[in-house]
Image (tube, rainbow, N blue to C red):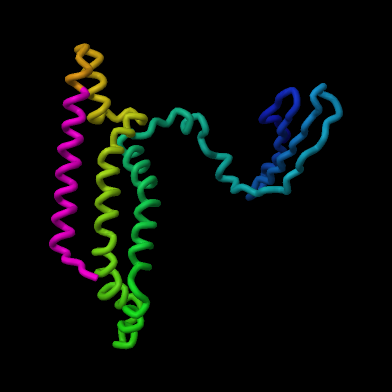
Amino acid sequence: MIGSIYRTDRLRVTIHTAPGTQFDAVTVHLELRDREGREPRELLVAPHVTFPARLAALDIAAMANYRANGIVMAIFGLTFGYSAYMSEVYRAGIQSISRGQMEAARSLGMTYFQAMRYVIIPQAVRVILPPVGNEFITLLKDTALVSAVSIAELTRRGREFAATNFNPIETYTMVALVYLTMTLLATRAVTWLEKISKYER
């Protein structure tokens, strides 16, 4: 079966499929014409890419009509976004511990995982506590971004209330005070955790 999936005056993308087997063979063919639309020049003929036949049985219409849960999408978005930063924080914290700590633990007969659990990780947690607290506070403020996936969070509720009652100054001032209160409480909590950890170099 041959079908053109994208076509303009200068570019045409054609897909060739050979169904009927366990795997559907797919070939992508690209052509580019000059500015006058003449002399087709082949850019690429991709090799046969095999896809499982079960993909052809997917209900594309049902997938197009799928509506995701906004709260789930917000959680996944914030998790994926901040997991990259947090992984770098943890990596830097672990690497900040001197190599002699691992060598001393291994010389006492500990395995690698025991040394990481009882020696390296407890020291690394004290090191990464301040940047983890900063990321948590930033995440707390970035929850205002979830309104992009139709979640009625604090900022969006404030915007709706201001548009309904025509008092934006009072509304946004209250929203800012709420965010300030949450940020100060989180900062106090991080400071308290730093004090009880009593990390000294």
Provide the residue span drawn in magenta: 172-201
Between residue 41 and residue 35, name the one nearer to us. Answer: 35
Please state the horizontal and vertical placement of residue 26, each as a whole percent of the image: 69, 43
Query: Is 198 a magenta residue?
Result: yes
Residue 161 lies, in percent from the top left, at 21, 18
Residue under the image location 80 percent in, 29 percent down: 33
- For image coordinates 27% across by 75% down, the residue present is 119
Q: Is residue 5 left or right of residue 39?
A: left
Q: Give the residue at x 67% y 30%.
A: 5
Task: Return the residue nearer the eye: 140 or 55.
Answer: 140
Q: Vertically, is 127 above or below 68?
A: below
**Quadrant of res 110:** bottom left
Residue extending furthest right?
39
Q: Is residue 146 left or right of residue 167?
A: right
Indicate whether 160 appears above or below 24: above
The image quadrant where one finds the N terminus is top right
Q: Quadrant of the C terminus?
A: bottom left
- Across and down, in percent, residue 184 comes to 16, 42
The answer to if 52 sits in the magenta stretch is no
Q: Is residue 26 above or below residue 98?
A: above
Q: Which one is nearer the viewer's eye here, 60 or 181?
A: 181
Q: Residue at x 81, y 27 (%)?
A: 34
| Residue 152: quadrant of the picture | top left
Residue 11 x, y percent position in the rendering: 73, 29
The quarter of the picture where residue 116 lies is bottom left
Q: Is residue 122 left or right of residue 181?
A: right
